[in-house]
Image (spheres, rainbow, N blue to C red):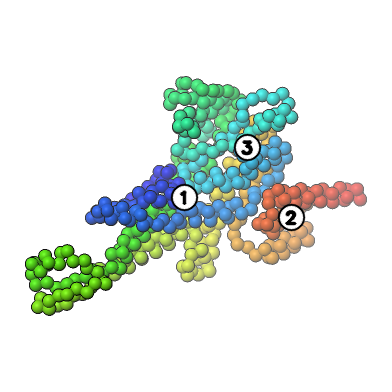
Amino acid sequence: MALTGEKFLIDAYTGKGGFLDGTYLIAHPRESDEKLERRKKLAVYPNYVKKVVDSYLSHLFKKSPIRSIESQEYQEFIQDVDRQGTYIDDFMRKAFKLAMITEGVFIIVDKPPGKATTKLEEKQLNLRPYLALRTRSQLYSYTLDEYGRLSYITFRETQPDNTIIYRYFDTQRWAIYTDPELKEIESQGEHKLGVVPVVPLHSTDPLLPNDLTATPWVLDIANLNFDLYNALSELRELFRNQTFSIFTIPVKDQADAEKLKDLTISTENAIPYSPEGGGKPDFIAPPPDPVQAYMQYIESLVQQIYRLANLEFTGGVQKSGIAKEYDWLEFNRTLTSFALQCEQAEYKIAELVCRWQDTEFKGYIQYPRDFSIRNLAEELETAMNAITAQILPPTGVVELRKKLTRDMLGEFVDDKLLSKMDEEIEKEAQDFTNRLNEEL
C-alpha cells in the first residue's frame, strides 16, 4: 500500500499524524479491533525520512552560497527576507525542506501596499519586498504561456478565523477574492512588474512541460518508512505472542476440560492434574520462523531506504573503497542538483525584488557545486601553487581566496563575517592594483 498525499508526506517527516496515533497501521485480515487498538498504542515510528532529509540539508547549506551583489536593494533585502528577521539562507533552507517533502513550494515575492514619494520615506514606512511560502495543497489554479511562463496563479488560503480567501496574481495586478469563482473582490491593486511575482521551487523536475508540480523527492523513502513502521509493529506483536508461552495440560475427556475453564493459568501457579490422562503439563510457543522472516524483511527495508537516498556509504554494510566512492559520488550528484534548483530560484527572487524597487539586479549568486570529501591540506597546497605559479588572473586569485576562507572558517563564523572578509579580500586586491599602477 503506497500513500502520496501532502499530509502523509509531512507526517512522515514530523512523525506526527497517523504515525503518532497509529492510524497508519494496516490491520491484519484476522486481527480483532481490540488487538489493533493495542498495537496502535504500542507502535513506534522509526523516522528515517527526517534523518535522510536533514542529512541532505545539512550538507547543502553547510556553506553559505557565494554572493557578489552590486544591487544595494538586494543586499539589504537578504538580511530580512520575510519581515521577521530571517536571513536568506535560513529561508531557502526552510523552503527547500518543504520542496523535498512535498510536490514543490511557491515563493511569493510581494510588497506591502502603500505609496512613498522618496526612497527614504519608503524605508521609513518599511515598504519593501518580502517573501511568503505556499505549498502545493494551497495551489488553486494557474496557466502558463507558450514559453512555459506563468500567466496567472491563484492560491486558496485558510485564514486564522477559518474563512477562505483566494490570492490572485497575474503579470500586472493582484487581487484577494472571497469566492471560488473569483468574482467577489475583497481588495486589489496593480504591481506592473510584467511578470507573475511567484517563484516555484522543486526538488525534482516536473515531468510534464505544463505542470508546476513535481514528484516529491522523498516519496519512495516515505513509503518504505511507512512499510517499516507497519513491519516493526507486527514484529512486536509476534514477540508479545511468543514471550508468554501457552500452558498445556492433559485431560481425560470433555468433562475434565469443563472443570478447568475457570482456572487461571500462569507460569507462577502450581496446577494439580491426574496422570491417568497420560502426558504431563507443558509449555509450548509458536515457531521462531515468522520472527526471523520479519527481522530479515525489516533489515532489507532499511537497506532500501539508504540505497534510495544514496546514503549507503554511511551505513554498516561492508563495501569496497570503490563502491563507497561511487555511493558518495551519487550523493554528491544529488546535492549538486539540489543546489542548482535553489540557485535558479534565488536568481528569480533577486530579479523580482529589484523589479519591485525599480532597479536591475546586478551581481551573481553561486550555491556550492562540490560536496565531496577533500583533504583541506592538499587543497591549500594546490591553491598556493596556483597562486605562486601565477596560473590564475588577479580576479581568479581573489575568488580563490574567498573560497579558501569559506573552506577553513565556514563552520565557525557566520555569513556576515564571511561577507566582511570577502570585502577585505577585494579591497586588498584593489589596493595592490592601485599601488602597482602608481609605480608604473
The numbered mark at residue 121 is none
Circle nearer the viewer, 2 or 1: 1
Q: Is residue 69 visible?
A: yes
Q: Amino acid at mark 3?
A: Arg
Q: For this rendering, which residue is in front, 294 or 38?
A: 38
Q: For this rendering, which residue is in front, 397 or 227?
A: 227
Farthest residue to the right: give it: 439
Q: Residue at x 57, y 32 (%)?
A: 197
Label 2: state its secondary structure: helix
Q: Mark 1 and mark 3 in contact (Cβ < 8 Å)?
A: no
Query: Pointer 3: what residue?
Result: 83
Query: Pointer 1: what residue?
Result: 14
Q: Residue at x 91, y 50 (%)?
A: 439
Label 1: state its secondary structure: helix
Q: Position of residue 4 (x, y in %)?
A: 39, 45
Farthest residue to the top: give it: 184
Q: On the rendered structure, is 256 left or right of 316?
A: left
Q: Earlier in the sequence, mark 3 or mark 2?
A: 3
Dot 1: within a 10 Å radius of its alpha carbon, few (fewer than 14), some, or many (20 or more) residues? Answer: some
Q: Is residue 203 above or below residue 265?
A: above
C-alpha span from label 2 to label 1: 40 Å
Picture quarter containing residue 193?
Answer: top right
C-alpha span from label 3 to label 1: 26 Å
Q: Earlier in the sequence, mark 2 or mark 1?
A: 1
Picture quarter containing residue 240?
Answer: bottom left
Q: Residue at x 49, y 58 (%)?
A: 310
Q: Residue at x 46, y 50 (%)?
A: 13
Query: Pointer 2: what residue?
Result: 401
Q: Amino acid at mark 2?
A: Arg
